[in-house]
Image (cartoon, rainbow, N blue to C red):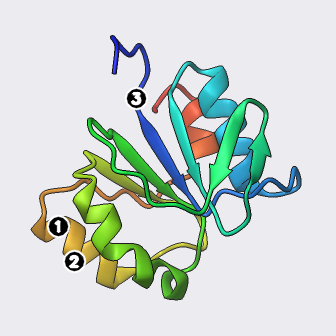
Amino acid sequence: MADQQGKLTVVLGASPNPGRYSYLAVERLAAHGHPVVAIGLRSGNIGNTPVTAEHPALENVDTVTLYMNAEKQKQYYDYILSLHPKRIIFNPGTENPELVKLATAAGIEHPYACTLVMLSTGQY
């Protein structure tokens, strides 16, 4: 990819439903200049960002931010780890000690935080 100003972020559990926090996260990440890959169960669009059910091969992933519960995350463990992100953000309701152990073993940061709050406070 060309010179990226923002941090490449994968939103896992993205929804084209405007009432979902994942929708707001994709919108706000893009508004803050972060390239976003939105992965969800249903395809659609969030602004100019397509939502895909695919698991695209990606390089230079800074962050995976989670918007699905721990049980649904299990099928994505291998994919998440294959991206070699610098961090995995566990948004409220996505806490998962099992994935935290895998992330720790792989040297991946894993804050329990809120992507929307991090963006609004300049901590992203």
Q: Does the CB distance between marks 1 and 2 fall below 8 Å?
A: yes
Q: Quadrant of the N terminus?
A: top left
Residue 32 in the image: x percent, y percent? 59, 21
Q: Which residue is mark 3?
A: 7
From this view, report whether residue 91 is shown above or below residue 4.
Answer: below
Instruction: Please state which amino acid type lies under the numbered disc 2.
Output: Lys
Instruction: Please state which amino acid type lies under the numbered disc 1.
Output: Thr
Q: Secondary structure at mark 3?
A: loop
Which of the labelled discs sits on residue 104, or is there none? 1
Residue drawn at x 13%, y 63% is 106
Q: Residues within 10 Å of mark 2 (few under 14, many from 20)?
A: few
Between 119 and 82, the one nearer to me in the picture: 82
Q: Residues within 10 Å of mark 3 (few under 14, many from 20)?
A: some
Q: Earlier in the sequence, mark 3 or mark 2?
A: 3
Q: Secondary structure at mark 2?
A: helix
Q: Is residue 49 left or right of residue 16?
A: left
Q: Which residue is mark 2?
A: 101
Which of the labelled discs sits on residue 13, or is there none? none
